[in-house]
Image (spheres, helix red, strand yellow):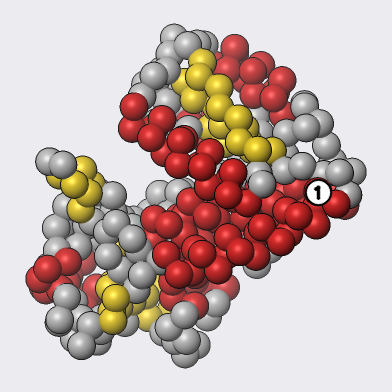
Amino acid sequence: MTEILNGTPIADMVMASLKTRVEELKQHDINPHLFLVQVGKNEAVETYVRAKIRRGAKIGIRVSHQILDENITYDDLKDEIGRVAGRDDVNGIMIENPLPKHLDFFKAVENIPYYKDVDGMTPTNQGMINLRNEFLTPATAASVTEILKGMNLPAGTTASIINRSPVVGKPLAMMLLNRDYTVTVCHSKTKDIKSLSRNSEVLVTAVGIPNFIDRSFVTEKSIVVDVGINPVQDTIRGDANYEELFGYVRAITPVPGGVGPITATLIMENTVRATEFQSLQGKR
């Protein structure tokens, strides 16, 4: 029988813990504040923004949202990020992706102080993962480790990641290495991905193609963590063909309901962690 790796119970437990931590901060007149920067109108982005605002409100985190003109220059965006970063009342900053084509997301992120980078995208936060110092980590990558933590897998467990982006694949590979996994990172130029995937106990997929992962990628012992979020007609599909794999693999995350709820919650955890760090270090 396939185990369904539902992320909602994990997210709920984290939220309960965060609520307590926020209440403790507020007892010292410290009010966590997350600031979301969006460039240009984008309904899909704004849907996620509203979800973050609602999630923050549940545990007492203030979430602000600013939409900048889609034609803004990089220099003006840099100045705006610097202005927000300089505010003592802002503890976390997140640039909503995607940006217009004339702007480089990762270049823009470099203007956020590492201790306010709740998306975990700055070179400092990415680099600290390599040194086993997981301060503010990319939420999607971290959500995968939270899912796997509940499996109680032994040291040396093999894992294949089909993604090499700084958002998921690269940080996740290092985070799994930090947890004593044996990791293979696959990408579009990798030869025989199916064989590599089948020979791994854990398969993490983030390719952005609905139903891409079928039985030819897995065995009955596979644990499939599906990071894909792919709009298909009026619904959302993952990268894995859930109907085909359910009942065959050892465990699988559903989409929606698997990685997603944890990812949204870990943005809030990073905000609380950043606030706690700033209050202790005097970095405001």
Q: Residue sitting at 52 percent across and 73 percent down? A: 177
Q: Residue sitting at 77 percent across and 27 percent down? A: 87
Residue 85 found in image quarter: top right
Q: Is residue 114 visible?
A: no
Q: Is residue 224 left or right of residue 100?
A: left
Question: x, y percentage for residue 131?
Answer: 66, 64
Question: x, y percentage for residue 110?
Answer: 61, 34
**Quadrant of image for the C terminus:** top right
**Pick the front one: 186 or 208:** 208
The amino acid type, in three-letter code, at marker 1 is Lys
Q: Is residue 264 visible?
A: yes
* Residue 251 sits above or below residue 231 on the image: below
Q: Residue sitting at 10 percent across and 71 percent down? A: 244
Query: What is the crowding at mark 1: few (fewer than 14 residues within 10 Å), some, or many (at least 20)?
Result: few
**Quadrant of image for the N terminus:** bottom left
* Residue 144 sits above or below residue 117 on the image: below
Q: In what element is the residue under mark 1?
A: helix
Q: Residue sitting at 44 percent across and 9 percent down? A: 71
Q: Is residue 270 left or right of residue 154?
A: right
Q: Is residue 91 left or right of residue 6?
A: right
Q: Is residue 141 left or right of residue 135?
A: left
Instruction: Tell me the residue that label 1 is attached to.
Output: 26
Question: x, y percentage for residue 75?
Answer: 59, 13
